[in-house]
Image (cartoon, rainbow, N blue to C red):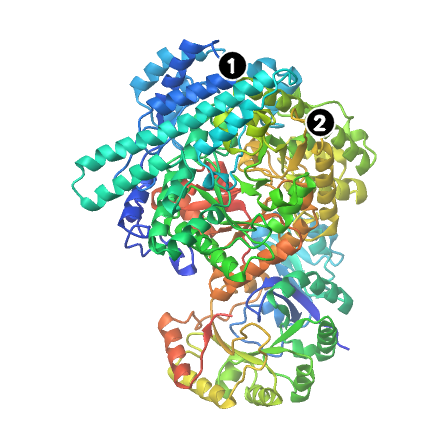
Amino acid sequence: MTQPLIFDIKRYAINDGPGIRITIFFKGCPLTCAWCHNPESQSPKVQKLYTPSKCIGSQDCIEICPENALTLTPQGIVTNSDKCNLCGLCADACPTKAIEMSGKFYKPEELIDIIQKEKVHIKQSNGGVTFSGGEPLMFSEFLIQMLKECGKQGLHRAVDTSGFASTETLLEVAKHTDLFLYDLKMMDPVQHKKWTGVDNRLILKNLKILNEFGANVNIRIPFIKNVNTGLEEVTKMAEFISQLNLKRRDLEIASPVLLNILPYHNIAVNKYQKLGSDYKDFEMTEPTEKEQKMAISVFKKFGLELEIGG
Amino acid sequence: MTITDINTVRTPERKAGAEGNFYSTKKTHLPGMNKRIQQLRKESVDTQESLSIERALITTQFYKENEGKYSAPMMRALNFMEICKQKTIYIGDDELIVGERGPYPKSVPTFPELTCHSVEDFHVLNSREQQRYTIPQKDIDTYEQEVIPYWKGRTMRERIFNHVPETWKAAYHAGVFTEFMEQRAPGHTTLDGKIYRKGMLDFKKEIDDQIRQLDFLNDPDATEKLEELQAMLISCDAAVVFAERHAELAEKIAEKENNNQRKKELRQIAEVCRRVPANAPRNLWEAIQMYWFVHLGTITELNGWDAMNPGHFDQHLTPFYEKEILNETITREEAKELISCFWIKVNNHPAPPKVGITARESGTYNDFTNINLGGLKPDGSDGVSEVSYIMLEIIEELHILQPGNSVHISQKTPDKFLTAATKVIRQGHGYPSVFNPDIYVQELTNQGKSLKDAYEGGCSGCIEVGAFGKEAYILTGYLNVPKIVELTLNNGIDPLTGKKAGIETGNPLDFKNFEELYLAFLKQLDYIVDLKIRVSNYIDKMFAKYAPAPFLSVVIEDCISKGKDYYNGGPRYNTNYIQCTGLGTVTDSFSVIKKHVFEEGTFSMETLLSAVSKNFEGEEVLRQRILNRTPFFGNDDDYADEIALRVYNDLYKAIDGKPNIKGETFHLNMLSTTCHVYFGLVLGATPNGRFAGKSISDGTSPSHGCDTHGPTNVIRSLGKLDQIKSGGTLLNLRFVPSLLKREKDVEKLGHLIRSYFTLGGHHIQFNVVDTATLLAAQACPEDYKDLLVRMAGYSDYFNDMNADLQQEVIDRTENEVI
């Protein structure tokens, strides 16, 4: 079984499905979306994050590094990635958490313990647990084990996915999932490949099959100006979704909205800096209010209600 | 500083309004349901706070002429009568509910018999930047000639300070604790429903009956009881005289009034004032005016802490409202207008300003009237009614500083009411705060109250609970628990002055393990608590002897039947609270020492104490290690939470059950109001990485910025404390508006509250603001004059807070979830 690294655990998650939830973020994703808000979610490996503004120059990290991979420069600590073996001693030694390691292994029972602690809030709000990423379906065996265990505990389970996985895996996961938060980015396969690194035909096919399978699906569209906010693109998405004939199947859970658009914002720039990577942000900007209104009205024409925001 | 017309507020730089923040940029009209309410509110908000010397002059004159002629209760009652007969009566344009403590709105009397302001005090109050109270020079001159000379050496404050032991003074001046009663009288009084069923004439009958039953042969206290009961009779008459003078004035104005509608209203006011408080009210208008006269009576008689509280006001008004709606003698709108008038009346009454150090301890205009909404009825059933919703609407519409308000959410409370309340919370006015009756009923029964009296209880002022209408629950002062840790780490010496403020409990460098340190802390704690109680009991005795409150005693259960004053054990229950502050700071400091010094040897005690004594100068690496590598309270981390639980339980042990002068006992309270800021100023750096002078943690909240795992973890940490043991805990959570954007987000806030209460939480309150708004407010205060912030049990205008308090609000952890 491939054990996923977890890069974040978010409590009082109120945008990842119904009620108050705890969201577990798996590290690793087959897509490389240009707008990704969590760039550290893409690599399935441990990564080092460095926040120069937190660094007070204690040099504890330099002293402790067995590989002599670190040097202090006027710009802060610089890591020689050829020497660094990601052992994490520098992060442990850093007094300010300017260096942090992203990605940690948890045993399934450890994660279950963490989830259970939130039960009082989950019960009160008809909330649950959400597995997100990254792409949780990359670690389907582990994911299914977690889903089964959460099911035994009577917890509502949501899986946040790009849909880019084998159909077989997806359907296996669906047997143990109460709600899918399914990302839909755009309809044009060429554009999709350009922006996310992968073709979208599998994603679209999987969405259809998942819906026919009888799963609860909440489609979420990241809405990014200069990427997918044009009238033509929006119309195509609306048409596709309307043909799916989505159904609200789970009436027990308070209002799982079927369709959300998530307006892009560029808060992630800071995260790219921490990873030491460039942000390929030359075209993408926040959608205007006018574009959001346009989307609402186009979807309405196809008989679809949508909600802005998670 | 005047709080001016909100219409003049310019558009803020950022569109906070768009984020569900309260700072609406689209204010096209004044707040309030109609013209009358808008105008009354505007006047109330615009009027500058001022001081009136009228009461002081009447009181001084009366005491000069009558000193030594009467018993203490009779002196107090006759003086109260004299004020009611002589004071200026005010009826404002378009008012429906009438009566002011001073000669006009926001004019505050002084109480020289308790503490006499000096000429210098007046100059300070007249000119200080914040919380200014104006007073004309000629009044200062009169005060200097007429009032000050007489009271020199006779005030309660001087009597108290003349008699306290040196050890107490040493601790007091070091800021180890405060003393509530050095400037104001014991208060924290909340009424039950009796004044809606009985008028002053009915009370007089009860008092007369009691006098007739006095057994002068066999009861050695009979004469004292007679004096107290006669004083109560006079007080009842005084309240009636006060009301009738309003009736006369209303009739006089009505005669000259040209507007027929207003003429009718004035005659109605006269009729109401002739009816109440002499008799029980018959309708909603009379019921509200009844309470208001009783309120004014108690805050005129003496200057009690937490002014006066109507308690479950919605429940008290509901029978009148329902009857009138049924009979079609009133509409919902008319009822709302009357209640709005009352709301504004309370806002007209800022707290009397204090002198000296307490201005720093609790600097605010707020006089802590707290209206309880919802909750449980005396029979234990759900107390929410249409009146509760009307009051929520008023709170949202008027957004004024006073009265404070709280919603009480039991398992029986409908979700609809909780959602309505959380929608008001979202507006970011800083209220309502949220209480859990299912827990505080247990707190009260644990203290020995009957279940019925406990069901009728609730909170007054900030977060302290009592049995309404039947209890004197005296807050005696705050305890600076982090300062006690500091004394322990300095063997009883206050490092800021080098003077001894505690006892010798050993050189901290000799402690071999955490237990030895902790036991030394417990010794200091016991010493300080006993010192505090000794003087509190002495002060209680002084008030019982020299400053009884016969009018207040009339309306609190069992004072009449016992023939005893409110301050002398007259009420059915008599509680003293000591309010412990800084649980987060203490826990985190102990966590640092336990983990880094004694368990992991990250650094030695000597290194730590040396860094602390240098205020971490040149020790930033050590300080950062402390901040980032220590389990802190508020993260659902058992390591820290177990320390918090232990400290909490030991505070309980140190305080609970110690005797007061009334044959009852002291109890633990975890309130801080704004005292954590003052306590921080008198405290050096602490082992948890906190710099000297920075505020300590408030109430039972985590240290600022140390709750890094979100609100659910904070709640679970707090849930580990057995809150039933206290008479109130306090949790502040700051929410940015973006967390409360949508309808369902607001519902989730309700779920968060319910889950905290499931875990045994007593109280929770929310600051819905964002840092950008606060920074903008600091940079450009005049544009944010109506920025209300909730802090530690009360709401205040951000602009009226001093820089320390403002910084404190900004520093709090934002529960931003991106």
**Neighbourhood count class around disc 1 (C-alpha, 10 Å): few under 14, some 14–19, many 20 upward:** some
Q: Closer to us: mark 2 or mark 1?
A: 1
Q: Which mark is residue B339?
A: none
Q: Residue at x 22, y 41 (%)?
A: B263
Q: Secondary structure at mark 1?
A: loop
Output the chain of dot 2. Answer: B
**Neighbourhood count class around disc 2 (C-alpha, 10 Å): few under 14, some 14–19, many 20 upward:** many
The percent position of residue B736, horizontal first and vertical second, equals 49, 55
Where B380 sits versus A227, above or below? above
Q: Amino acid at mark 1?
A: Ser
- Total marks placed: 2
Residue A83 in view (yes/no): no
The percent position of residue B76, horizontal first and vertical second, equals 47, 20
The percent position of residue B438, horizontal first and vertical second, equals 63, 51
Q: What's the distance in space between the residues labelled 2 and 1, CA to CA?
A: 49 Å
**Residue highlighted by disc 1:** B71
Comparing B638 with A56, the one in front is B638
Q: Residue at x 62, y 58 (%)?
A: B755
Q: Secondary structure at mark 2?
A: loop
